[in-house]
Amino acid sequence: MAISPLFNQPSHIPINSTFSHTTANSNTSYRRKSFISKSRLELEEAIKSLEEETITTIISKDQQAIYNRLISSCIRHKALSHGNRLRAHIDQARLEPSLFLNNQFINLYSRCGDLDKARQVFDQMPNRNIVSWNAMIAGYCHNAQFFDALSLLQTMVEDGVVPDYLTYLSALRASASSGVLRHGEQVHARIIKDGFFFSRIEVGNALINFYSKLGVLHDAESVFDTMMSRDEVTWNSLIAGNSQKGNCERAVALLVEMHEEGELPDEFTYGSLLALEDTSYTEKLHSQIIKKGLASNVFASSALLDAYGRCGKPQDARKVFNSMIERNTTSWNSVISACIVNGAITEGVELFFEMQKSEVIPDDYTISTLLKAAMTHLSTFTAKQLHGVAYKMGLWRDASIGNTLIILYAKLGLMKDSLHAFEDISEPDLISWNSMVQAHLNNEEFEQALILFIEMKHLGFVPDKFSFVAAMEASAALPCSKTGRQIHCNLIKAGLLPLDAFTGSSLIDMYAKCMAVEDAKKVFDRINVKDLITWNSIVVGFAQNGYLNEILRFITLMKEESKEPDNFTFTSILTACANATAIEQGKQVHALILKSDFKVDTALTNALITMYCRAGSIKDAKKVFSAIHDKNVVSWTSMISGYTQCGYCKEALKLFDQMECEGAIPNAKTFIALLTACSHGGLSNDAIKYFEIMQMRHGIKPTFDHYACMVDILGRAGRLEEAERIIEGMPYKPNALVWRMLLSACRIHGDLEIGKKSMEKILALEPGDSAAFVLLSNLYTDLGFHEGAMKIRKLMREKGIKKEPGKSWIEVNNRVHEFMAGDISHSQTEEIYLKLKQLLKPLRDEGYVPGNSFLR
């Protein structure tokens, strides 16, 4: 029979591996080329030729050799599909694979991540040897199935199979990676029992590595001390363990001992030492690396680059990099990272372009590092450029790159691009989903964030604490206590109890923002270990809900728990006091601040200014302001706003002039405060002047709010046509608010023509705006056009539009209560109205008549 060659062998390679083979049906002999594959293409040709041959039911020695060579080639190329075809060929022929071949199939399936098939082969083997067990255990370790690896070891022992040192090396790796100390301790006991501890140095090294990774360094040291012989791996394992644990002095002392015992440090020794948090050793280690002749070693040099980056010395890192003869991807990544981490972004990007010109190919870490740098600078062009590079490199579907792009685009406000980056990921992981939820949160798309959280769960992803915290943040922002409680229940079902400080603080914040302070307090009480953030969350939560007396009690409890309130604590409390105009509580907090020994930051002094100003105590606010040594733009803006709130509008403008004289640079919010002062003081000409100064002198582009302020100012001043021109000429689409401002001004100044036009604009944007109808109706009435007013009221009835009732707020015993006109919902309604009559009687006796022109 004619047999076609399996693959073309290069002419320069002699055909010396041919052999004769006799089929069951014929005595024909033929010469066959070797099945040893040189590439995946040749492997494909070899497998295809095998499939086309006549199947025999007996495997000859020659055939066995062919199968052995093919499976070895499949393993080398990680060619799972070819291995499956080879297995199928054997199964179809009902052949009996050798023990060696079955073991190789276990290796292939394990290395390619198909553990089910690997276990199937293992379970169906008629005979197993120690290699079979080791292959399967190593396969579980290779695929991070560490508990399965340890379980199989237990089965192996129960079946009477005696492990060898390779078994124990895999078992110790599994124990170290699983993070369960007792598993490794049990393996350690069996190693001693089976006599492998003293006979194999590799086992002792693996034990040191196991105890070091779990942070049990005294046991690692004990193993080290009892080892009869040591090599460089032994020393490196213990040095690495101490380095990871942050034991700088012991790690360096081990290096000295290593020298004394005549063992030479290698690049891995110095790599571990350079990873120490204490970077004071970096330059000394650098000198030793040069003396030991390791300066040209890529691994040692890359570790130096990383260390100098953490030292804050990117220039030293650059010197090391420039002196390197050989550079790999890690070297380039380290020097790029050293520059970027230390703020030399431009230099880092330039190095990346140099890397592209060299023969070294960037990897996902390179792109990820640069993308994170782009986050700090938030450049759309840079983001798109790096995205393009990732696309060209085939990394655009990589989860780590995609996850970074999601957050980057979201920070730039490019949610469509963020979504595209998410959709491009070939296999989104939990971090991908968390990133997308966070992206919606960053852009205040809270409902969408919750929808995505629910979708993630439906697709089978198990949320982690970061997922739940994001979902709680979305619920708090809506706010929706019902949804928040459902998320809390899901968190409990997910087994994330007991609550840690991070998750617990988020729960407290959510319940507080949903005005469920009692639930917030219950969560707080159930957190075992409370940090400062936890205390701040409960204090801020109670403060925001008006429980101002309780927060002073919480501060006392904090001190009893040795948790001192910080700037954030007091700033949050003062903000709550300012919002509730609760000056007495604010003064008590101020007294506590003066008694505290921490350094008060500018944010806290600014909060004090705001609190005193809102309470009308401008003198106290001015004292605080004058005492600030390093005033920032917020300090000046807060004081300018304070003067305005207290009616000192001209003083606000004088303070701005002083601000400019002292060289402080105003921002957009400063000019909002200035324009508000002009509005309250009726200073329309000054407003126009400052509006021009903002643009011409300070180069600040007016926002929508600046234009709205100008409309309000000109409207109040009766300059209605100018206000109308501002609206129609601003580079933003006018909303109903600015037209309503103009309509309100028309009512004050009796301009029916512009008032009707404003009304038309409002209804085009918000057809159901009751305030606009009422304003125009009142304008008609004021001008004596009662028929027109009646038509407006009739139109309101036909459209089902009702005027919103007036509301008032009052603080009693540190709680803010809301009342509407004619309100009878309060439990003490009768007492309230009786008190109101008592208050009004002396006023009426004195001849007071309430104004009602704006109540129609």
Image: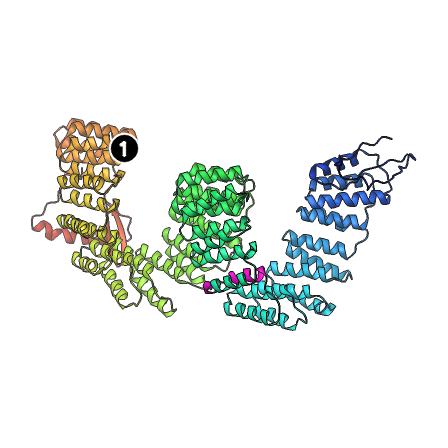
Range drawn in magenta: 266-280
Location of the N terminus (image quadrant) = top right
Location of the C terminus (image quadrant) = top left
Secondary structure mainly formed by the magenta segment: helix
Taking the view exactly as shown, the residue that stands out farthest to the right is 27
Residue located at (36% from left, 59% from top): 536
**Rendered position, 809 above or below 795:** below
> Pointer 1: what residue?
731
376 or 33, nearer to the observer = 33
Residue located at (50% from left, 67% from top): 248
Tell me the element at label 1: loop
Q: In the image, is 38 to the left or to the right of 15?
A: left
Q: In the image, is 414 to the left or to the right of 103?
A: left
Q: Image quarter for residue 259? A: bottom right
* Residue 512 visible in this rendered orientation of the protein: yes
Confirm whether the magenta stretch covers residue 278: yes
* Residue 214 visible in this rendered orientation of the protein: no
